[in-house]
Image (cartoon, rainbow, N blue to C red):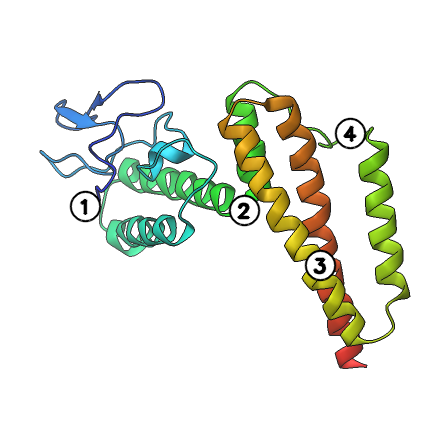
Amino acid sequence: MMNAASKNTDATGNGNKTCWSCKGPVDAVALFCDTCGAIQAPGQLDHFARFGIARDFNVDIDAIETQYLKQQQALHPDRFATKSAREKALSQQQAASLNDAFETLKNPVSRAVYMLRMAGVEPEGGEGQTVNDPALLMEAMEMREALDDAGDRAQIDAIIRDVRKTARDCENEVATAINGGAYDAARKLTTRLRYLLKMAQEARAKKARLAAA
């Protein structure tokens, strides 16, 4: 049984819920009932509560991964092979919620998007949305042109270093904006960070193609 996070309350402020099996009280973030051992439904926990951490953009990825692996082990299908259909279904729901939380929080862009939506703010540049920021579009165009013109791995390495540094600086700005409640700035910075990380990925892909040629 897990529960580094079990001393915290969930996002709705409910510290306890009722076990479906024994009807006893269960901590909102617990995977299993302490009384009867039955697995619980994932409920409405936010991703931060699921890992027992504060709602802060700056997260300890290694600590989250440690919690993720512990919970993943506790939810392994083999542990539920002889359980009831309901317990198997709940374990699958818990596993899906756990995976979603981990994948969201480990990526700075998806984490920023998630935190913006928690605050009721829709991020820029989503599906079907047009980015209307001339400065950002110009920066992206110039980076793409530089990558297109790069003819060897040394040039691409230089681009990767520059983009990574710029992305780290941008991520720090995103953290400051989100944690400070400056959501308009955070929306724009999150879009910029998305562009920067995508450019770094494209640069690595081009380097790999040159190495394989």
- Name the residue tied to disc 4: 128
Earlier sequence position, callout 3 versus callout 4: 4
- Name the residue tied to disc 1: 1
Earlier sequence position, callout 1 versus callout 4: 1
* Dot 1: element: loop
Question: Looking at the image, which is closer to me, 169 or 68?
Answer: 169
Q: Would residue 60 appear left or right of 126 to someone viewing this image?
A: left
Instruction: Please tell me whether residue 69 is drawn above or below residue 110 in the rendered image.
Output: below
Q: CA distance from mark 1 to mark 4?
A: 43 Å
Across and down, in percent, residue 119 comes to 52, 20
| Amino acid at circle 1 | Met
Q: CA distance from mark 2 to mark 3?
A: 20 Å
Quadrant the C terminus occupies: bottom right
Q: CA distance from mark 3 to mark 4?
A: 30 Å
Q: Residue at x 38, y 44 (%)?
A: 95
* Dot 2: element: loop
| Amino acid at circle 4 | Gly
Q: Residue at x 71, y 56 (%)?
A: 163
- Name the residue tied to disc 3: 162
Mark 4 or mark 2, which is nearer to you? 2
| Amino acid at circle 2 | Asn
Mark 2 or mark 1, which is nearer to you? 2
